[in-house]
Image: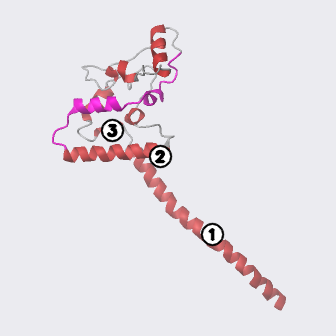
Amino acid sequence: MKEADNKAVKKSPALRKLIKPAVLIIVGILIAFPLFSITYYTMVRTSTPEFCASCHEIQSAYNTWKTSTHVNNAQGFVADCMDCHLPAPHDTFNFFYQKTFHGIKDIFVHFVQDKYDRQKNLEIAYASFKNEQCMKCHRNLLYIPDKRGAMLAHRTVVYPRAGYEKKCVDCHRPLVHVPRQQYDYKQFS
């Protein structure tokens, strides 16, 4: 009988060593899963063009975006606000940082700035654009068989010579945020 009691006593400390980590893992999951879910849900809900347009300063940008070829094209592709204005989501840390920074900046401007200067902010946005933002979607720029001039022009952007760097928006500036009387519809690629 004493031998059975000794085995039970010896198993008890090993069992205790397993219970503590198991409880910590379960508590960690119970805290982390809802926290992750709320964060993810918030990011998804605040990443839509409609959410961006809920701020009256952005409403005109939203309206001009809706009439552009970035929404209306034969390919059926729609480039949302964050596709152009934020880094790629797979660069997770930078994406969350930039999204948070832009959101806080927009809220600050909303409450502090007397008058929203659309043209000035448009210039700031164009100046801050990087070619990588455009090339997240426009990847096959060097093979355009029926448009040799465009293909050669894109080559100077993709492989620039030192001192001759260009931005995509240098040539393609009037594509998105330009007031139009009608929808701009791109039928052919």
Question: What's the residue type where badge 1 is placed?
Answer: Pro
- From the top left corner, tell me how far across and down residue 148 is, in percent: 48, 8
Q: Secondary structure at mark 1?
A: helix
Q: CA distance from mark 1 to mark 2?
A: 29 Å
Quadrant showing the N terminus: bottom right
- On screen, residue 81 above or below 156: below
Location of mark 3 (residue): 50
Label 2 near label 1: C-beta < 8 Å? Answer: no
- Tell me the tag on residue 21: 1
> What segment is highlighted magenta in the picture?
113-142
- Total numbered labels placed on residues in the image: 3
Residue in the image at 52% along x and 16% along y: 142
- From the top left corner, tell me how far across and down residue 184 is, in percent: 33, 19
Question: What's the residue type where badge 2 is placed?
Answer: Phe
- From the top left corner, tell me how far across and down residue 7 is, in percent: 80, 83
User: Splitting the image into 4 quarters, where does residue 70 fall?
Assistant: top left
Residue in the image at 28% along x and 43% along y: 106
- From the top left corner, tell me how far across and down residue 123 is, in percent: 28, 29
Out of 175 and 181, give the one closest to the viewer: 175
Considering only order in the chain, which callout, 2 or 3, is on the residue closer to the N terminus?
3
